[in-house]
């Protein structure tokens, strides 16, 4: 603990872990003003720039890598951001925050939340970044409602999450789009929030990414878009935005933001899975009653032994289990990798034995909201049961309506060991046959 004096218009760069209590004076931090007696924290690995609004004294507690430093404010974005963001009419608005990786999207989202709270609003927040989700676990888009000042989105209580199967948004962007729209509607109509702020992922430059972001703006009926610009990454996006009618605010990115590399991000996600799932217990689920929505098993047409033998022979692959759904059959066989073979009019999707081991899955309610993440351990084809590791504390088994398979495989330490694409391929096979059971 250390007491420090601060002067008017002084800028403090604070690296977490750190905890600051105001003894005297006032600090501006992420859209909020902290007066005497109030305090805020900065998380490990994060940096926050605060501005002193007058003479004052603060109490500083730093953790192992924590640091506080007085900096020259001339290159700071804090005032520019504040001026630009103050022009937003928050009440009844839906605001989408866009930008590449590490440019400050989550920080700008936090500022908007605090500005709303400062104005007495009930602010809905959506973290639409399944890779680095701060409200819910990785692989989800999640929603919350803020009523207090925050320094990190992680301080918000998760209200609702939707599982989007993977953290690689480019494979599931249309599902992410629908999920975010659904959360916006839920916040607006189910919880009567005054404003919704949407934080997004950093996939921004590809033509598909631009399309995704423009579609999102349309789907959620956004009335403001904030684009954080660092270099040329957002040029195509800005061109796209110019062609639609929307209030667009372009902000500079902080020059000294902390960068997280790929490994940092992966490790953070893995910590996210284990924090969520541990301590865990095993749940046995009858897939005939609570089916896997994106991989039909146990409710289709079973072949008799004679036909199974015939199929085995014509495919020239040992098959252990097979079941048909209209023009698609799902088989488990001695193959190295997922493959699709055609036999007559039927496309047979053949999955390797143990294909399920370690796949992330979601237990969902009847409205497709996440009840719990889980890790699929084993499917027993003779009984139609699945064993899934879930958090020990999970006690909403009655609400589980179905299972949704994800596209990430983890090992026993919750490290990501594979991103599988075949679930997506099976889903498109099914939808081409019009036999997807549930969206
Ligand atoms: N004004 C600032 N000056 C310096 N660093 C900042 C400033 N504002 C935020 N940061 C830090 O920069 C880093 C990136 O910010 P932030 O997490 O908001 O970006 P992001 O675009 O959401 O990143 P991601 O791609 O990981 O989602 C964080 O460590 C954050 O604490
Ligand atoms: Mg972010």
Image (cartoon, rainbow, N blue to C red):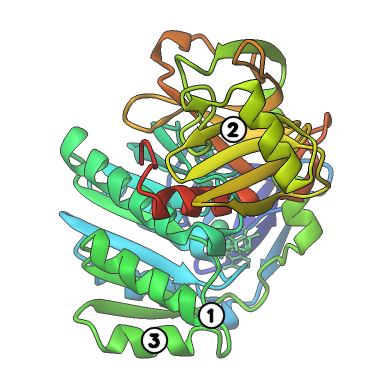
Number of disc labels: 3
Q: Quadrant of the C terminus?
A: top left
Task: Tell me which label, 1 or 3, sits earlier in the chain.
Answer: 1
Q: Nearer the viewer, mark 1 or mark 2?
A: 2
- Is there any visible trace of residue 227 in the rendered image? yes
- Which residue is at a point 61% across and 69% down the rendered structure image? 101
| Mark 3 crowdedness (10 Å alpha carbons): few <14, some 14-19, many ≥20 | some
**What element does badge 2 sit on?**
strand
Determine the quadrant in which ligand 1 lies.
bottom right
Left or right: 266 in relation to 111 = right
Name the residue located 68 percent from the left edge and 66 percent from the top edge. Answer: 70
Question: In this orientation, does residue 421 appear?
Answer: no
Q: Is mark 2 within 8 Å of ligand 1?
A: no
Which of the pair 245/52 is nearer the observer? 245
Q: Foreground: 276 or 84?
A: 276
Disc ID at residue 206: 1
Task: Find the distance from the CA under tag 2 to the CA under tag 3.
Answer: 36 Å
293 horizontally vs 418: left or right: left
What percent of the width, then of the height, locates residue 376? 68, 27
The residue pinned by badge 3 equals: 238
**How far is disc 1 from disc 3 in space, using C-alphas?**
13 Å
The residue that disc 2 covers is 361
Crowding at dot 1, Cα within 10 Å, few <14 / some 14-19 / many 20+, comes out as some
What's the distance in space between the residues labelled 1 and 2, CA to CA? Answer: 28 Å
Report whether 159 appears left or right of 45: left
- Contact between labelled residues 3 and 1, with CB atoms less than 8 Å apart: no
Please name the residue shown 65% across and 25% down the image: 306
Q: Secondary structure at mark 1?
A: loop
């Amino acid at each position: 603990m250390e007491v420090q004096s601060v002067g008017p218009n002084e800028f403090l760069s604070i690296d977490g872990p750190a905890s600051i209590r105001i003894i005297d004076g006032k600090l501006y931090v992420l859209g909020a003003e902290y007066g005497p007696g109030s305090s805020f924290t900065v998380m490990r690995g994060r940096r926050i720039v605060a501005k002193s609004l007058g003479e004052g004294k603060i109490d500083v507690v730093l953790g192992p890598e924590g640091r506080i430093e007085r900096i020259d404010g001339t290159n700071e974005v804090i005032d520019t951001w504040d001026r630009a963001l103050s022009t937003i009419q928050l009440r009844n608005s839906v605001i989408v925050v866009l930008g590449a990786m590490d440019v400050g999207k989550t920080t700008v989202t936090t500022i908007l939340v605090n500005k709303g709270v400062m104005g007495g609003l009930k602010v809905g927040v959506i973290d639409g970044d399944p890779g680095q989700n701060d409200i819910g676990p990785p692989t989800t888009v999640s929603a919350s409602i803020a009523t207090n000042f925050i320094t990190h989105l992680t301080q918000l209580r998760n209200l609702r999450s939707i599982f989007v199967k993977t953290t690689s948004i480019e494979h599931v962007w249309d599902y992410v789009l629908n999920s975010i729209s659904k959360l916006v509607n839920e916040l607006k109509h189910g919880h009567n929030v005054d404003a919704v702020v949407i934080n997004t992922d950093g996939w921004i430059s590809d033509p598909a990414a631009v399309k995704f972001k423009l579609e999102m703006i349309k789907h959620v009926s956004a009335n403001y878009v904030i684009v954080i610009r660092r270099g040329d990454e957002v040029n195509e996006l800005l061109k796209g935005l110019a062609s639609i009618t929307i209030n667009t605010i372009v902000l500079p990115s902080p020059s000294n933001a902390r960068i997280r590399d790929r490994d940092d991000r992966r490790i953070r996600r893995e910590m996210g899975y284990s924090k969520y799932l541990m301590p865990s217990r095993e749940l046995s689920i009858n897939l005939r009653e609570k089916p896997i929505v994106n991989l039909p098993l146990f409710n289709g047409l079973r072949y008799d032994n004679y036909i199974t033998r015939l199929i085995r022979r014509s495919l020239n692959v040992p098959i252990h289990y097979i079941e048909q759904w209209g023009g698609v059959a799902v088989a488990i066989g001695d193959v190295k990798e997922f493959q699709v073979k055609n036999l007559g009019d039927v496309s047979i999707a053949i999955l390797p034995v143990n294909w399920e081991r370690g796949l992330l899955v979601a237990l969902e309610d009847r409205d497709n909201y996440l009840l719990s993440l889980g890790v699929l351990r084993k499917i027993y084809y003779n009984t139609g049961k699945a064993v899934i590791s879930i958090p020990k504390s999970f006690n909403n088994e009655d609400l589980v309506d179905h299972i949704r398979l994800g596209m990430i495989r983890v090992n026993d330490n919750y490290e990501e060991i594979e991103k599988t694409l075949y679930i997506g391929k099976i889903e498109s096979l099914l939808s081409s046959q019009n036999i997807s059971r549930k969206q």
